[in-house]
Image (cartoon, grey):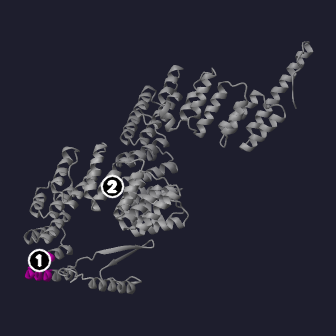
Amino acid sequence: MILRLPLRLKSPKASTLRLFISTMAESVSRDYTCLIDACKTMDQLKQMHSLCITTGMGSDPRIQKKLLVCCCSRRGGEMGHACKLFDRMHERDLVVWNTMIKGWSKVGCDGKGVTLYMTMLKNGVMPDYYTFPFLLNGLNRDCASDCCRQLHCHVVKFGFESNVYVQNGIVYMYSLCGLMDMARRVFDMRSKDDVFAWNLMLSGYNRMNQYEESRALFLEMEVNMVFPTRVTLVLILAACSKLRDKDLCRRVHGYVKECKMEPGLKLENALINAYAACNEMDVAEGIFKSMKIRDVISWTSIVKGFVETGNLELARTYFDQMPERDNVSWTAIIDGYLRAGFFKESLELFRQMQSSGIKPDEYTMVSVITACSHLGALEIGEWAKTYIDRYKIKNDVVVGNALIDMYFKCGCVSKAQKIFNDMIRKDKFTWTAMVVGLANNGHGEEALKFFSQMVVKSIQPDEITYLGVLSACSHTGMVDQGRNFFAKMTSEHGIEPRLVHYGCMVDLLSRAGMVKEAYEVILNMPMNPNSIIWGTLLSACRVHKDTQLAELAAEKILQLEQENGAVYTLLCNTYAACGRWEDLRGLRRKMMERGIKKKPGFSSIEVDGFIHEFVAGDRTHLQADDIYMELEEMTHELKLAGYLPDTTEALLEYG
């Protein structure tokens, strides 16, 4: 029914009729707004909008406003339709503008709310205390960074700086763009009894990885006698897991126990994660077993916890029991096998992950690439890179660093350099990977050039970088430069040399034939040398035929590792190289009496994406006959080419 008022009605009867028609119009308008409220979906709302237009009610301001509110406020609303409604509205009061700003806030569209706000001001409509909470809470990080200070000025200009909801919005805005000092200033000026504001600050500190500040704020919250909510406890538990603070973790758990607060799934998951990070797996497992409801996060937290504590067997047991798995749970168990040195098994798990239809993310791919690095599995590593490119997996600096490391460990120096050159963003780990990789592949001078560029670019080297630098000097025989860099570690970069750095210096001097100087370095170390450092010296003594120092080094190693068969073998080889056959036979008898044997090493090769491992004399491979036949042919061809192997030490390894 379409109701229109006559243009000229001046009699008392006409006034009565006008009042009647106006009342009827209001009644119809109320009926339509009730019908609009009853709409459950956007399709129903659009159908109702069409009905309003066909019945002549589409231009009614009350109907238009109600339709706009439903588009902007309800779940499943549509801002595109809201914009069309907004553009056709002739009467736009502050409620309408606020509704649109709130709508853009809900969908998180970049800068739309701020643009609309500026348009509102140009149209002469002034904001109220509803405008800024909608506007500030709808910002994303980039938009907040661009206009946070200007919006704060507008809040002060229009006199809303003391409004609690506006203050919360400002705290959220500053924390979003990382200006935690500004957020704290606003927070300190307001009332301290609103737990929501405390949660905003905790969330901001966590977002900026300022976990110490989160802990301090929580303790201050307790002093102010503000009772935490579940959200508060989840946030502080996240900080606990990063800080590995057992005491605070137990303290937070106490709120759940003593106050008889129903923890809920998120809080229980946070407790498991925090206790696991603090190596309190007994408590974490107890919480897990007592849970009435578990989700994939619960299972993943317990699996990850056992992985972190090195209990791979229990981690796998829980993983196999999981009712459902996501990419995070798969990545956790793959990473567990990777940490334990089971590189082939980690790749096999990745194949199972693919078979189950779970799409990997960048963290999974870093684990896969790292496994390929350790195995020298170039073909699988190349496949992983292609997979990342094809499926648009986030190729961030961590992935780039892993690829550089993988290519270097597989001997593909040029490919590693190409990855480095193509990376848009590089961190100190990128530069370190280049320095270490080039050094390990015999490009010592180039590694030192990269180190010089790194210092020029004001990128602070760390102890790993210096391992690469010292290794580069060792491989290129630059003894003086190595000593120089060793001194600069402390004098220029404040890095105290660790055992591995002293080991590099021993290796540098040993390779240069300066075994006496290498021994002096060991004697003057501020920490006790390990068997690896003594082993480096022992190997150098064999090469340079220093039996006296070799015997001393061997004795030191055996004091640390009594059953180390490799030490006896190296000493035997040293005696053989020096022609001391009586000493050699005496040592061999001692080895036989004690039943000491050198553990055989193994080699691996990648063929068609599969890793094959071999030890000396191994015949367990399915193609062993073919392999040995090929080996005999190669040996025959080498002899024809005039090659004579050095067999002076061959029997000593296995006799």
Which residue is at the front of the view, 355 or 333?
Answer: 355
Question: What secondary structure predominates along the stretch shown in magenta?
Answer: helix
Q: Are marks 1 and 2 in contact (CB under 8 Å)?
A: no
Q: Which residues fall within the magenta stretch?
A: 573-590
Q: Amino acid at mark 2?
A: Ala
Q: Is residue 121 left or right of residue 430?
A: right
Nearest the viewer among 84 and 5 is 84
Q: State whether residue 216 is above or below residue 280.
A: above
Question: Picture coordinates of residue 568 (x, y %)?
Answer: 16, 75
Q: Which residue is mark 1?
A: 575
Residue 225 placed where, x, y %? Answer: 42, 34
Q: Magenta includes 578?
A: yes
**Amino acid type, mark 1:** Tyr
Number of residues whose C-alpha sits closer than 10 Å to that of mark 2, classed few (under 14), some (14–19) or many (20 or more): many
**Residue furthest to the front:** 641
Residue 411, percent across and down? 34, 64
